[in-house]
Image: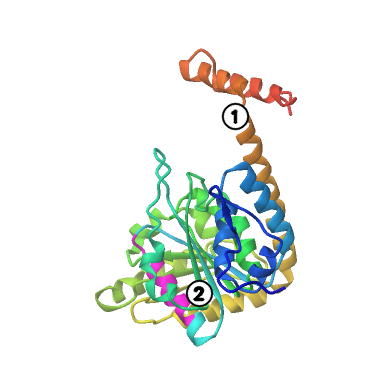
């Protein structure tokens, strides 16, 4: 069904984005404006928007053909610069359509976020085959935003070939990205043993590819030394997949060295683990289910006056957190043993 050129796929009424019958078709047809509005609704906490988002996700269905790649690294390692160089290689040289979901840390006090990734990927953002969506983490642990799973589903429905999920940084909670993606890339800076000590073992055990970035100029020698350190460390770890052994390599987003090799390596990993794809996606959907259930139950409880009263007692020191948890569980009909 056709639509008038320039027509708003999500007409606004009193500040509310209203879902129309054609939205899923517009997203599948590659309407970037429809996709952006759909993501806005998916990320909203309003009850009416949540209902619209659920209906839209049901409508677009599930498309498992995209290659999901999670990219993480310590602040200053050059994630945005690397992603732009990597993304430009995919869209320019290989003709692929790439979506970048860049999750920025939010203030724990105000909930605000800088959302500067799009401004740091200006060249990639201008390419017609690239779609960049910065999102505030909203205080969610795991390096991803609360609705990142749903946003991935939406950009996959829009027929993007590669979905790059840039997480907020490195930490033990960053392992949550493994429940979202097909490949997990850890970017590190040329810093030798000190950098190796600063990265959590849990992250390295889940990484499918470790890339030592900034391997150029005065840092090249140090980057090569760091690469040797990580390659040696990987040799002491048990691979998380029976069909793929993680590797370490060097790259430079500035010169382009290693960018193509990074993609070739990831493609080799994807081919090697092809037989695991269905099982991995099923596990991801199951994780999404329980994550959503946990979020909704927590939201409902936090809005319950009885729970707020119990929380007030905990804050006042008159009730222990453990005893309070038992009282809250009893509200939803669960005994402490359950």
Q: Residue at x 57, y 44 (%)?
A: 45
Q: Quadrant of residue 193?
A: bottom left
User: Residue 77 at x, y = what percent?
Assistant: 36, 64
As helix, strand or loop, the secondary structure at mark 2 comes to strand
Q: Quadrant of the C terminus?
A: top right
**Within the image, what quadrant is residue 205 found in?**
bottom right
- The relative height of residue 105 versus residue 262 in the rendered view (above or below) is above
Secondary structure character of the magenta stretch overall: helix
Name the residue: 62% across, 25% down: 304
Left or right position of 65 against 321: right
The magenta stretch spans residue 38: no
Q: Residues within 10 Å of mark 1 (few under 14, many from 20)?
A: few
Label for residue 229? none
The image shows residue 161 at horizontal and vertical percentages of 60, 75
Residue span colored magenta: 76-89
Q: Is residue 303 visible?
A: yes
Q: Nearer the viewer, residue 196 or 296?
A: 296
Way the structure is coloured = rainbow
**Residue where numbered disc 2 is placed:** 130
Contact, mark 2 vs mark 1 (Cβ under 8 Å): no
| Residue shown at 62% from the left, 41% from the top | 295
Residue 188 in view: no
Q: Earlier in the sequence, mark 2 or mark 1?
A: 2
Query: What label sits on residue 303 in the rendered view?
Result: 1
């Amino acid at each position: 069904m056709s639509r008038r050129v320039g027509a708003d796929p999500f007409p606004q009424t009193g500040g509310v984005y209203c879902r129309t019958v054609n939205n899923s078709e517009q997203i599948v047809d590659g309407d970037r404006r429809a996709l952006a509005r759909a993501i806005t609704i998916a990320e909203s906490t309003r009850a009416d928007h949540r209902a619209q988002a659920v209906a839209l996700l049901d409508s677009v269905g599930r498309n498992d053909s995209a290659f999901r790649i999670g990219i993480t690294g310590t602040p200053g390692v050059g994630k945005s610069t690397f992603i732009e160089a990597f993304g430009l290689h995919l869209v320019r040289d290989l003709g692929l359509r790439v979506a970048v979901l860049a999750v920025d840390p939010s203030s724990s006090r105000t909930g605000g976020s800088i959302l500067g990734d799009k401004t740091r990927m200006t060249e990639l953002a201008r390419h017609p085959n690239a779609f960049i969506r910065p999102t505030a983490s909203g205080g969610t642990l795991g390096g991803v935003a609360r609705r990142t799973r749903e946003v991935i589903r939406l950009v996959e429905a829009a027929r993007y070939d590669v979905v790059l999920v840039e997480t907020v940084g490195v930490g033990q909670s960053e392992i949550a990205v493994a429940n979202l993606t097909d490949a997990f890339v850890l970017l590190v800076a040329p810093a030798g043993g000190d950098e190796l000590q600063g990265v959590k073992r849990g992250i390295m055990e889940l990484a499918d590819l470790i890339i030592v970035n900034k391997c150029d100029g005065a840092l090249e020698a140090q980057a090569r030394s760091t690469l040797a350190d990580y390659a040696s460390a990987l040799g002491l770890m048990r691979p998380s997949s029976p069909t793929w052994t993680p590797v370490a390599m060097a790259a430079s987003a500035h010169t382009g060295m290693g960018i193509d090799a990074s993609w070739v390596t990831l493609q080799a990993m994807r081919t090697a683990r092809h037989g695991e794809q269905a099982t991995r996606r099923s596990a991801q959907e199951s994780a999404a289910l329980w994550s959503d259930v946990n979020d909704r139950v927590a939201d409902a409880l936090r809005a319950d006056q009885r729970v707020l009263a119990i929380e007030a007692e905990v804050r006042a020191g008159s009730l222990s957190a453990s005893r309070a948890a038992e009282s809250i569980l009893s509200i939803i009909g669960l005994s402490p043993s359950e």
